[in-house]
Image (cartoon, helix red, strand yellow):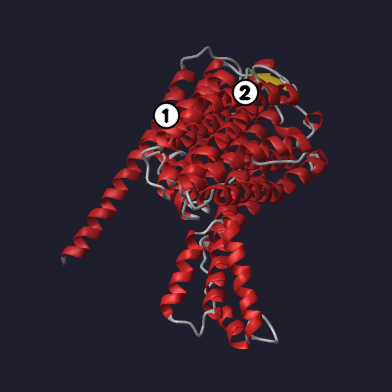
Amino acid sequence: MDLNDLNQINKASSSARKDLIRLSLGLAFILLVVLYLINKEHVEGHLMLVIAAVFGSYMALNIGANDVANNVGPAVGSKALTMTGAIAIAAIFEASGTLIAGGDVVTTIKDGIINPQLIRDSDTFIWLMMAALLAAAIWLNIATSLNAPVSTTHSIVGGVLGAGIAAGGFEIANWPIMGKIAASWVISPVLGGLFSAVFLYVIKRKITYQPNMLIAAQKVVPILIALMTWAFSTYLIMKGLKQIIKVDFPIAVSISLIFAIVIFLIVKPRIVKASANLEPSKASVNNLFTYPLIFSAALLSFAHGANDVANAVGPLAAINDAIFQHGVSDKASIPLWIMILGAAGLAMGLALYGPKLIRTVGSEITELDKMRAFCIAMSAAITVIFASQMGLPISSTHTAVGAVFGVGFLREYLKHSNAKRMEEIRAHHEHNDPEKIAEFLNAFKKASIAKKGKMLKELKRQAKLHTDTSLLTKKERKSLKKVYRQELVKRSHLYKIAAAWLVTVPLSGILGGLLFFTIRGIMLP
């Protein structure tokens, strides 16, 4: 056995030990929940509550492992945060969002996707919700193992739909609502991708394509940070704090605008001072976006904890309510122990299994720097605000991942366009000395956007004077067709993630239905 074989065995055994430790800690968390409930006051149906709490704990761990990566992945991929720092920030703010703004009441039927009036008794309802919870958790576990970020909301929706149909037939489902959810599969990533691409294009036009990037950054970056403050304040007031206080959109925008103006006045002189001693380079400009990215990761995590924890604690709270009230109601209160379970589960799931998806979102789809990550964070907030006002269905996961793809595809387009432009310049200089070509290309790269346009226009005018037929000869056109199209987005991740999105609701639904029949078969005498 040679040294390479020994190294591979050591790596495999080390990986196996780490997996065993993570599994042990996850099981220990679930066991603590069980021990807590065993010592609580026993009521009729107490065993079902304990089993449901196990499913809810498992679901919370999987939400932390899969969904939270969307909030911090871009910040880690751009190196604005280390993996450890990102996990710490996300865990703290996810838990804070859950406990502070998660609310004390939840709707028992997620998004109204089934009609609770058609559920015959509380036992059937409890079995239905248990099946839905376990089905969603299993699918999220599978998706995480496949490195596929999926929507936890769609997972629980699919579980409830499948279990509901198994319990009450196809007429129990609210198909118009399901149609809207299906529409979000397309609307969310498209809007997220478009907004992120627009923001990145603006940054490139106004900063990185300018002759002096730092001077341009001193003017533009404070405006971008103020815009981010406006967007995130509006997002937080409308989504993250909606359980505490209900605020209309115009009021939220007005309050956020005040915050944005204050932040602009504070940030503007600091950006000028910070950039005074920096080199006029893209790397220097990137560093100006570090702190905004850290704040965005924290705020997105807070809002996520306030909203999406309901995917884990909502069904569990509904089961708890049905056991104690001996019936099915539209609303259920959330006991403190369930909120703590959700908060702790999200944080632990992120710490144990989150790095896998964080790396996928942050660095494996496309290469991110701080400017690109900033555009993704902005897109996540703007898309949710825009969609909510337009009445469009939206998925935060699909939006964030779509924003990553939008940045990547814009980079591909710009790289390809630039390569074609360079080939066109070389074709027009075909008979010139290499020194002259290099001199023109160097001047072209350093020129502003407006000057580049004039240089190209003049180049084409001169070419037209030398040829009576067209701007480019047949040979030149052939040369341009050979330009290599560099792929900056990994297509394998695109196809895998898109496939996972499409099957989330159907697979969760099938699992939910099968698990409902299984649970009912076990519980019936």
Q: Which residue is drawn at 61% across and 51% down?
A: 197
Q: Which residue is drawn at 56% across and 67% down?
A: 416
When the figure is inspected, residue 69 is found, relative to residue 303, above or below; the finding is: below
Q: Residues within 10 Å of mark 1 (few under 14, many from 20)?
A: some
Mark number displayed over residue 432: none
Amino acid of disc 1: Phe
Residue 257 percent coordinates (x, y): 65, 25
Alpha-carbon neighbours of circle 2 within 10 Å: few (<14), some, or many (≥20)?
many
Compute the Cα span from label 2 to label 1: 19 Å
Q: Nearer the viewer, residue 398 or 4?
A: 398
Is label 2 in a helix, a strand or a loop? helix
Query: Is residue 69 in view?
Result: no
**Which of the labelled discs sits on residue 29, or is there none?**
1
Residue 492 in view:
yes
Left or right: 425 in relation to 249: left
| Residue 228 spot, x, y in % from top left | 58, 34
* Quadrant for the C terminus in the image: top right
In the depicted structure, whether residue 472 falls above or below residue 63: below
Query: Dividing the picture into quarters, in which one does residue 413 lie?
Result: bottom right
Which residue is painted at 72% across and 38% down in the image? 386
Identity of the residue drawn at 80% across and 38% down: 172
Residue 317 is labelled as 2
Q: Earlier in the sequence, mark 2 or mark 1?
A: 1
Say how many tags the image has: 2
Q: What residue type is labelled 2?
A: Ala
